[in-house]
Amino acid sequence: MSQERGFLPLDELYREVVLDHYRHPRGRAPLPRVDVTAHGHNPLCGDEIDVALAIDGERIEAVQVTGRGCAICTASGSIMAELLPGRTIAAAEATAETFRRLMHGEPPAAGADLGDLELLEGVQRFPVRVKCALLPWMTLRDALAAHRDGTPAAVTTTEGEAP
Amino acid sequence: MAVAPSPRTALQPHALAARFPILRRQVRGRRLVYLDNAATTQKPDTVLAALQRYYTLSNANVHRGVHTLAEEATALYEGCRARVARFLNAPSERGVVILRSATEALNLVARGWEHHLRAGDEVLLTEMEHHSNLVPWIMLARRRGVVLRHLPVRDDGELDLGALDTLLSPRTRLVALTHASNVLGTINPVADIAAAAHAVGALVVVDAAQSVPHMPVDFTALGADFLAFSAHKAYGPTGVGFLVATPELLEQLEPVQGGGEMIREVHLHRATWNDVPYRFEAGTPNIADAAAFPAALDLLEELTMEAVREHEVTLTGYALQRLHALGWLEVHGPRDPRRRSGLVSFYDPQLHPHDLAQILDAEGIAVRAGHHCAQPLMGRLGVPATARASFGVYNDTADVDALIDALIAARRYFGLPTESPS
């Protein structure tokens, strides 16, 4: 009997829509106005991401996501750029938390619409890649926290974050 | 078109592979192609049998009991020390400290030597060091105000020896460098650097984790004062590493851990130390894994390190040729396989190393993707991470061919072109 953990088909990790986000990432264009930025870094694999937000009161108006990362990190950031504009800060934070729970295999919180993020569900079966998927969202959370504190920029690192 | 190397080498990788039980297993339904030997090597059946034999027949604590098992366990443990000294042509087995890892050995030097150093003294490192030969010195610098300097890496992956004159001075007290880079493969001219270091009165610490398992290493000829390496990268068990020095130099090193084994006399308020090397081996050591390591060295000596080296030069040359021929990869390190150890790091600017390694894994191919515990070097190379294929005695050109096929398959999977731009 072999010691296989069960065959993990690659296509479960790299869904077609995920690959499309990777090849044609959304939200790359510079914003006319930037209210807060955050820089995210995953030192383990070298993923780097920059998130810039335009915020009007409680509402996120526009999102720019740039950087250099693997397919999973890039796709996750692209989906984020597609999902967030028009959402309130509270709704964006709820989405980040729901996605974090999904990646860690915890029961989902009610309410948040994950959109194409659902297609990253397969990532949780590849534990070392969970950090890649979460990096844009951790960076977003830090950007929102910085905005709340009235600082213009934050730095995020996934070092020490359990996979 | 790639040309297969001539089968001049004395090594028979296919026959050798049969002696490594793990190589018979499948991964994701495919034959395991293990190309992560710089991270750790697989273990031959003789090492597995030695482990089993130790626990089945001789398990006891060392250096204490007078009973038969204690004598046997002590003889096996001390046999490892003597075997390592002989393997490396070290001056005395009393100069071999048995530790947990090469990392622990480097930390022991950084900690144990610090009472000889004062603020403003300099330690010279290189830009291609593994974190295990960077962080202990960073910690030392914080404690003692010692200044760290770094020998630069040139674009061709070699150390910039021209900078040695300006970097070495009477303030330089230690020079710590790797014998062979775990990312670039570069084999550094340690003997030349050691001569220059000794001329200014500095001691030389060599991280030999990537050289001892892959080429003949002679401690005395190398000119090292301290040499660190680990068993698990040399076909031995995990959890055993060594610090090698002369017993006289070990006498000048302070013990870092206190406890049983390392003492001679203990009173309530003071204690005296045991002789070297035992004073650095507090607590019950990793007896079983040390007892099993000589079986790995037996294998290497049976093959001869000259033949092991020749095999890896041939295989690395073949891999370099095929990787370059793909046309889309940055291949790091010296072009001449004779100037490097048996590993190749490469970077596809259009495909992140993690995605690449994921596709390779689906093909049963194990490579390392990441920063290889060498983040400063990644910055120097201008890449976020690399993929690395590293070879062992059981690898052959069929493994390289499988890697190349999978690299092409990975590009196709992500919809990237696979025609060479030439």
Image (cartoon, coloured by chain):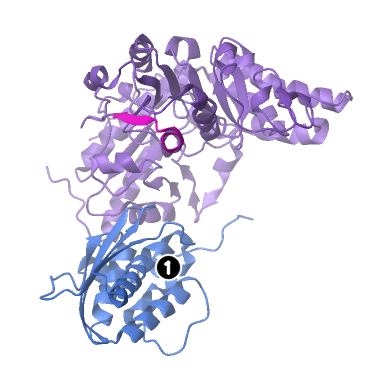
Please provide the residue range marked out in magenta: B140-150
Q: Where in the figure is residue B215, as x and y percent of width and height?
A: 44, 21
Question: Could you say which quadrant of the image residue A89 lies in?
Answer: bottom left
Q: Is residue B181 above or below residue A118?
A: above
Residue B141 lies within the magenta run = yes
Q: Residue drawn 36% across and 53% down? A: A43
Give the amino acid type for the residue marked by disc 1 in the picture: Val
Tell me: A130 left or right of B351.
Answer: right
Tell me: A114 left or right of B347.
Answer: right
Colour of the chain lettered B: purple
Tell me: B326 left or right of B96.
Answer: left
Q: Residue furthest front?
A: B269
Q: Which of A48 and B58 is in front in this view?
A: A48
Q: Where in the figure is residue B294, as x and y percent of width and height?
A: 64, 24
Residue B178 in sight:
no
Colour of the chain lettered A: blue
